[in-house]
Image: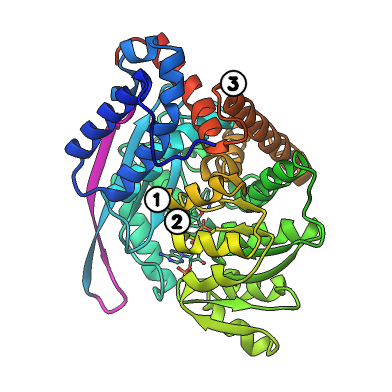
Amino acid sequence: MMVVNSLTETQGAQYVQHVFETVKKRNPNESEFHQAVKEILFSLAPVFDKHPHYMEQGVLERIVEPERQIIFRVPWVDDQGKVQVNRGFRIQFNSAIGPYKGGLRFHPSVNASIIKFLGFEQIFKNSLTGQPIGGGKGGSDFDPKGKSDGEIMRFCQSFMTELAKHIGPDTDVPAGDIGVGGREIGYMFGQYKRLQNAFHAGVLTGKPVGFGGSLTRTEATGYGTVYFVQEMLKDNGLDFQDKTVVVSGSGNVSIYAMEKAMQLGAKVVACSDSNGYVYDKNGINLDTVKRLKEVERKRINEYVKEHPEADYFEGCENIWLIPCDIALPCATQNEIDETSAKILVTNGVKAIGEGANMPSTLEAIDVFLENGVLFGPAKAANAGGVAVSALEMAQNSARISWTFEEVDAKLHEIMVNIYHNSKNASEEYGHPGNLVVGSNIAGFLKVANAMISQGII
Ligand code: NDP
């Protein structure tokens, strides 16, 4: 089994090592971006050994460089009348197969490295969905926690006032991510409409259903992650029935991953937020989590007030100490390190489905692969969100709305296809069952071929 953190000395391997060194030199101090590039580049080495023409066309040198990066000032006024300034980002990474597409993240940790890692991953993820969408990402170091509705609205309006100059339904179509849900998308859409004096429904996805949003978009990433894991389990003679599941986070992706896993007969015993985690041996009560998080916007420690049989622990990273059959990291990047991965393996974990982006470190991924744990990497397992965003764009263009069941069925089919395309690529390129290698190669080939067809641009 190939590991993702080391290479053999083939021509392809030397080529990717060379490009990786250039990326590190050109983008100093961007550790998250380096990590994402390393994972993808190292797993592409077999492609260059088999098809040297990708090297001759400089595809890799071009794909690691964003087509455009925009960094801008976001000034706004808080409830005390004080001027606040945040930094806005939009990275338009690759438009070879469609308009740039990727979410906006509002979180104090946001910086160029984080947005670039997310944008780079998005290129391959979007390609894997089979939909015509390029890769992009954006956001701000704005912290929505504890802000009033008015503050959120004023920030979103200021953010969109600049972003509007750079996006459009055929150019770049942002969506939500951490800290950006239907409320924020609504405020940004309103400001875009006002600036353009036009109702371009397809300029943002993740809109509320009342004005162009797609049914199932809210559920799509979480449901999609579970559909992917379901297919991976099925292919290995397993299923979700009666399995113990741990899901990190308690935001959009986590809530709907929990919901679908429960519908498939699993017992979800733990979830978290950035302060700590809840363990409920009777199974998490999802209605309580949904109300606390989606309606009341409270912390997860409130859960135990309503469910005294459950326990709350400070420190979200220790959630991986809980023994489980299936782990679904759905919070943020690098939340499972090598130590946590080893604990999960020792406790008998059978499958990992990455709902969050890059939640496992490279060392953690190696631990899973070396120990034969079924591993669904983020860009494959969490592609359901952007896939349904592309379906939202299709509905907006055609001015129609599909039912929940129609969109859900398409999502399910897309996730099954992503699993098999990744698995097939892993076999074709000599690493059977390694879905990290398989999904990176399957995502890369379509984009690389389009780039070659379009000339050196
Ligand atoms: P939300 O903002 O809805 O929820 C994020 C959850 O993760 C919250 O419970 C949050 O806790 C927790 N969290 C955030 N940052 C940290 C941190 N630094 N340490 C620990 N916990 C943290 O975001 P989403 O559910 O939309 O996104 C979750 C992950 O899924 C991200 O990696 C995102 O990129 C990825 N993703 C999302 C998609 C989508 O459609 N929304 C699509 C594909 C991937 P707290 O409330 O305390 O901040």
Q: Earlier in the sequence, mark 3 or mark 2?
A: 2
- Residue that label 2 marks: 187
Q: Does residue 65 appear left or right of residue 349 in this picture?
A: left
* Label 2: which secondary element: helix
* Residue at figure coordinates x 65%, y 35% from the top left: 419
Q: Which residues are magenta?
A: 62-81
Residue 22's disc is: none
User: How far across and down, in percent of the image, does residue 124 sit?
Assistant: 47, 32
Q: Are marks 1 and 2 in contact (CB under 8 Å)?
A: yes
Q: Position of residue 362 (x, y in %)?
A: 42, 48
Which residue does the numbered mark 3 point to in the structure image? 428
- Which of 353/218 is in front? 353
Q: CA distance from mark 3 to mark 2?
A: 46 Å
Quadrant holding the N terminus? top right
**Residue sitting at x 70%, y 70%:** 286
In front: mark 3 or mark 2? 3
Q: Which residue is mark 1?
A: 191
- Whether label 1 lies within 8 Å of ligand 1 gets the answer no
| Element carrying mark 1 | helix
What residue appears at the point 68 percent right and 50 percent down from the top-left corner?
226
